[in-house]
Amino acid sequence: MKNTKIVISIILSLLPLIVQAQSEISKTWVADLGNGKYKNPVLYADYSDPDVCRVGEDYYMTASSFNCVPGLPILHSKDLVNWRIVGHAINRMPDCAIYGEGVNHGGNVWAPSIRYHNGEYYIYYGDPDIGIFMTKTKDPSGEWDSLTLVKKGKGLIDPCPLFDDDGQVYLVHAFAGSRAGIKSLLSITRLTSDGKRTIGESRIIYDGHDTDPTIEGPKFYKRNGYYYIFAPAGGVATGWQLAMRSKNVYGPYERKVVMTQDKTITNGPHQGAWIDTPTGEDWFVHFQDVGAFGRVMHLQPMIWKDDWCVIGEDEDKDGCGNPVLTYRKPNVGKTYSRSTPAESDDFNTNTLGLQWQWHSNPQDWWYFTNKEKGCLNLYSVPLPDNYKNMWDVPNLLLQKTPASEFTATMKMTLKPDKRFKGEMAGLVVMGLDYGVITLRNEENGYKLTQAECLKADKGNAEKVNEQVNLSDPTVYLKVKVNSKAQCQFYYSIDGRKFIKIGDLFQAREGKWIGAKIGMFCLRPIKGNDGGSAEIDWFRLDK
């Protein structure tokens, strides 16, 4: 335990250098280098706790989505480097997972696993306040079944199933200390053959308190007669990757550290998935915490030696690898073109782009995608009771921020209800702190305001940095974000000449998620109707 504390202390002392180096990487980031190699991270956006399964030549990935809706994003790849988002497994959180009319920050969907069995795809995830849920489908890009509560209990997190050779089904999971009252333990329980219910109680199979504190995020596999559990330990920003093995599903399990940061700049390299290719190669995906931009996904080479895995490059041949920054692309038998998850949206279809998420379950009337007109209508939603700032506003329509320099621009027309004053809409960079540019209808016309709110999660009020009066409700709003997550806001009345407004804002992460960017439409009066904001397009340029 003493040695573990020393290692964590050393890593923490290096974090400022790591963040600086990461900023330099993000300035020139391209995952697929076009020369047969790739550069990490392969997904430079907040896809926390990723898990991947392969079916034939197709790879499907999901990740934690916490309170954001739709949840459980589904991404598809052919080569583990180029990814695109193809859907979500959850359209709405179950009623039991929503608390009041606000936002359950950092709650709901934690560390999912995705598996393929008997022609169906399964996803299990832990809701730390309720228990372990499951959903399944035959088409991962289509509709998923309604959620099933597999095991009820507070603090049950990070589940992963194993469909054994003899027809038995097992589930490994961890514990959240904030809810369960204990952590650093892993347990296994049996499941019914359909994977929908537990049989008996969970049995603790590993105690990491002494050598692997905060062990969590287990993934379950079987190979060469061994049961394997891959699990991270040591904390999100400072941890390492373990592999454990046993000939008996309930242990005892041997443990081995198979990847650490060592002298690399990739802090906390852990928690993810072992996958293979049709050509017989082995690879490992995991995340790295990069602060305001969230937890980004890396791809590491992996080999097996004496029935232990080695992840990353093992230059000193001690059986423990270190993360790579560049490497040859996986040999999947073919070459595929570069692709990335969607970011811009012209709103010219009848549905929102797959990149968009609300901060909580949406109401049916919050928006209208007007394909005929080619725009998005956001209807003004009354501010929550006891409103202090935008932290607990559920109808924020947001997407992940890419962890590189980028500019986001949107064209918006505010269409307020003539009976009311104070209806507003705008562009926001949202996190524990947030920066915002808002157009509001007032007694004497329209007012554009740039403001920020520091420690929004603590209930602090917004601070206005600059205001200007406008005569027209149509405005172009822009924010430029640099690799240090510093944001400068701009506006334009003609879409050509942009004027700087307000101060430079330093973005911060949210609750277990990276900073997000998007739009909103609000009104201070409840009433029975209101106005709207018409969004012509939202474009993100790198």
Image: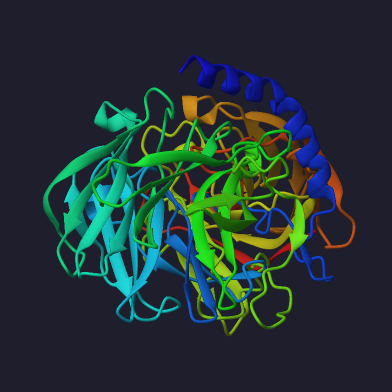
Which residue occupies the foreground of this view, 505 or 124? 124
Q: Position of residue 510 (x, y in %)?
A: 54, 38
User: What count of labels does the image hold?
Assistant: 0
Which residue occupies the foreground of this view, 148 or 427? 148
Q: The C terminus lies in which quarter of the figure?
A: bottom right
Single out the residue that lies furthest toward the top.
2
Single out the residue that lies furthest toward the left.
200
Q: Is residue 58 above or below residue 296?
A: below
Residue shown at 71% from the left, 25% from the top: 14
Q: Where is residue 357 in the image (x, y as percent from the top left)?
A: 50, 58
Residue 431 image-quadrant placement? top right
Single out the residue that lies furthest toward the front.
306
Which residue occupies the foreground of this view, 61 or 383? 61
Q: Is residue 403 left or right of residue 393?
A: right
Q: Where is residue 300 in the image (x, y as percent from the top left)?
A: 64, 55
Residue shown at 25% from the left, 51% from the top: 248
Q: Position of residue 290 (x, y in %)?
A: 65, 40
Q: The N terminus lies in which quarter of the figure?
A: top left
Q: Is residue 166 left or right of residue 342?
A: left
Which residue occupies the foreground of this view, 41 or 253? 253
Q: In this view, does 464 lie above or below 157?
A: above
Residue 94 image-quadrant placement? bottom left
Residue shown at 78% from the left, 65% from the top: 37
Residue shown at 83% from the left, 63% from the top: 495
Say how the picture is coloured: rainbow
Residue 37 visible, this angle: yes
Residue 90 visible, this angle: no
Q: Is residue 299 left or right of residue 364?
A: right
